[in-house]
Image (cartoon, grey):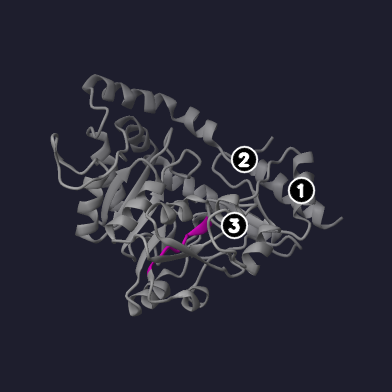
Amino acid sequence: MIKCNNVQEQAHDLSGLIFERWREVFNAGEFVLGDEVPRFETWMSQRCAGAYAISMNSGTDALLLALKALGVGPGHHVITCSNTFVATVGAIVAVGAQPILADVGDDELINVDTIAPLLTTRTRAVIPVHLRGRPVDIDSIVALCNAHGVAVIEDCAQAIGTTINGRQVGTSSDASAFSLHPLKTLGGLGDGGVLVTTNPKIAEYARSARNHGLQVRDESVVFGMNSRLDSLQAAALNVKVEHLDHWLRRRKEIADFYNEALGETATGADLGKQRTGSSYYHYVVKSKKRDQLQRHLAEHDIQATIHYPIPVHRQRAWLNSQPATALPTTERLAQEILTIPCHQHLSDGDVEKIAWTVRQFDSR
């Protein structure tokens, strides 16, 4: 089976280097906030044009602490999209704010046209999602929000390597959140995340709050939480970062091939329409016969998955606690989208087979 992810292969390829780095951590005995953690944060800061980078337990916690740092809480509205992993909305609910869901365009991304009608005096923040590694038009969103005194937090969970004008996304807003989940292009061997910001006050709060607000071992300055990236995860990531650019280049090569091979088919090329700066965390096509296409690919030993089959506003968690919401474009796309494999462990033969199999389905 040609798989949609390469978690096992990636871990196996680098296991020797990772075990060697872990042995150094074992010998030092620095398992919490040891030297590997600031080393990774320095790399992430450099990747993000010198912005502050505070590692933590997950991308979800990065969103949560960004919201808290900006004073978002009960009585406030936060606008985001519904075609995202549930954690984006869950972080808003966790701070006691009201999530307000915007519809998306045909490229699956929210934009100023879908956000603007939802802005009110209660809106405190907007969380645009760089879904699938596609860059949203962040500058126009920030300009709109600045005009209304609204903060912007970029959800970059899927966007390591995503750029705008050659610059890593995540530094155009008040703060951003990256995920280091094993499924991500740059993923650890467990959970992890990073909060990125150019605001020193947000950085100071996040760095303290992720560690129970401890200023020194026995003195807490704010009530925080335990959201530290452990040293073993940081060590593994410090090995992987040396390979990231190669992985990103391979994903783009595959996406370029798909765009050319599938561009004239009924299924069509990636919904991002070759959006400049995409890191192709997912390569997604759409079909009115999506379920049949998925089965056809499976019959040819090709895994294709759906990200995400049930938008957040159709999940039981939302229906049991939030007001009914209609998002027609989001709902239509959820019935048509299909993720096909696009990662660095695919051979040229694999990629050709996938494209051929999609074309074969379209010609039936």
Where residue 21 sits in the image (x, y, percent)? 32, 27
Where residue 324 sits in the image (x, y, percent)? 59, 64
- Of residue 239 and residue 231, the one placed in the foreground of this image is 231
Q: Is residue 250 visible?
A: yes
> Which amino acid type is shown beneath numbered disc 1?
Thr
Measure the C-alpha gap from mark 1 to mark 3: 17 Å
On-image quarter of the C terminus: bottom right
Q: Is residue 161 visible?
A: no
Measure the C-alpha gap from mark 2 to mark 1: 15 Å
**Is label 1 or label 3 in front?**
1
> Which amino acid type is shown beneath numbered disc 3?
Asp
Q: Earlier in the sequence, mark 1 or mark 3?
A: 3
Is residue 51 shown above or below 352?
below
Residue position marked by numbered label 2 in the rendering = 347
Question: Callout 2: helix, strand or loop?
Answer: loop
> Which amino acid type is shown beneath numbered disc 2?
Ser
Q: Which residues are magenta?
A: 124-131
Residue position marked by numbered label 3 in the rendering = 256
Residue position marked by numbered label 1 in the rendering = 357
Q: Is disc 3 surrounded by few (<14), some (14 to 19) or many (20+) residues within 10 Å?
A: some
Question: Is 246 covered by the magenta stretch?
Answer: no
Left-right relation of 180 to 292 = left
- Of residue 272 and residue 98, the one placed in the foreground of this image is 98
Question: Callout 1: helix, strand or loop?
Answer: helix
- Of residue 336 and residue 135, the one placed in the foreground of this image is 336
In percent of the image, x 55 and y 37: which residue is there? 6
Q: Earlier in the sequence, mark 2 or mark 3?
A: 3
